[in-house]
Amino acid sequence: MQAIKLELPTEFKSDIDLIKSELKELKSKFSPKKSEELLTRNEVGDFFKINASSVHNWTKKGILTAYQCGGRVYYKRAEVEKAIVKLNK
């Protein structure tokens, strides 16, 4: 069996090179989305050494932001840690 050799026109080669360079640029700028760690009310309470009712009160006051999924309440770790900075100012 003989292999057939095909030669691409020069304009195709330049288009392919352009596409390759654009893909390299996109790849260098691409970063996968990081998943955020979620904490339960009790975990936030343990973090601050307070009880769950205090965590609920802080949520009502706007100190912490709560997120709900399937009837459960969660807090984003990054936001909980930012609340510390706000309290220390």
Image (spheres, grey):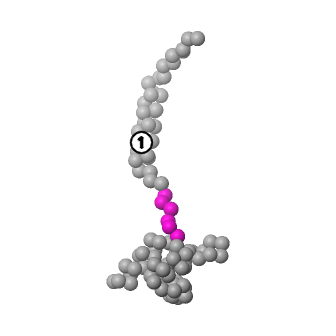
Residue 71 vertical position relative to residue 7 in the rendered view, above or below: below
> Measured from the top left, where is residue 38 in percent x and y?
52, 70
> Measured from the top left, where is residue 76 in percent x and y?
50, 72
Seen as rendered, the residue at the extreme left is 89
Q: Secondary structure at mark 1?
A: helix
Occupied quadrant, residue 42: bottom right
Q: Residues within 10 Å of mark 1 (few under 14, many from 20)?
A: few
- Dominant SS type (magenta): loop
Left or right: 82 as drawn, with respect to 38: left
Query: Which residue in the protein does label 1 denote?
Result: 24
Per the rendered image, the range of residues in magenta is 33-38
Q: Residue at x 40, y 47 (%)?
A: 28
Q: Point out the image quarter for the N terminus.
A: top right
Residue 27 vertical position relative to residue 65 in the rendered view, above or below: above
Q: Residue at x 54, y 14 (%)?
A: 3
The amino acid on which the numbered mark 1 sits, given as a three-letter code, is Lys
> Measured from the top left, where is residue 12 in percent x and y?
47, 28
Q: Residue at x 41, y 50 (%)?
A: 29
Occupied quadrant, residue 2: top right
> Measured from the top left, where is residue 4 in percent x and y?
54, 15
Residue 83 vertical position relative to residue 29 in the rendered view, above or below: below
Res 62 visible: no
Res 81 visible: yes
